[in-house]
Image: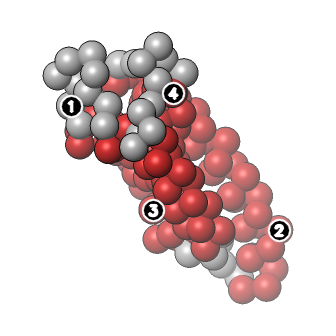
Amino acid sequence: MNRGAHLGIGLICFFVYNFINNSLVNVLVMPFLGISPNGVWLIGTGAVALGSVAPDILEPARHWNHRHTFHSRRTLKVILWVFAITALIGVFSALFFYVSAFFLGYLFHLLADSTTKAGLPEK
């Protein structure tokens, strides 16, 4: 997949994630702690965009078989867990929300690559 496709997928997923996160913040956090989301979406958009292209920055596509460590199923599993943990903490912390947005972009980059003919290697 090309960089534009990865960015598009990442941004679409981020806007859905941001909507869900803001809904949780409005229902759970604001009534009890008085914290508001205050436009965290702008920095989150940058974080998800960076995460969407990070695997290709770490492992540039120099040939058709460029997928190794940073484009592997093992990395997909690790990124999924890191995203889940940071997303849970991100409901209460803007910093973790940004970190989870980065890993969301990375996660959907790998998921998109897994649907291509080359797929993802095991490790």
| Place of residue 112 in the rendered image (x, y in percent of width and height, measured from the top left) | 51, 27
State the separation of the CA atoms marked 4 and 1. 17 Å
The residue tagged 4 is 114
Q: 44 or 50, which lies in front?
A: 50
State the separation of the CA atoms marked 2 and 4. 35 Å
Q: Which residue appears at 56% of the width and 75% of the height? A: 93
- For marks 4 and 3, the one nearer the N-term is 3
Here the colouring is secondary structure
The residue tagged 1 is 60
- For marks 2 and 4, the one nearer the N-term is 2
Circles 2 and 4: CB atoms closer than 8 Å: no
In the picture shown, does residue 55 fall above or below 18?
Answer: above
Tag of residue 99: 3
Tag of residue 27: 2
Q: Amino acid at mark 3?
A: Val
Q: Is residue 23 visible?
A: yes
Front of the two marks 2 and 4: 4
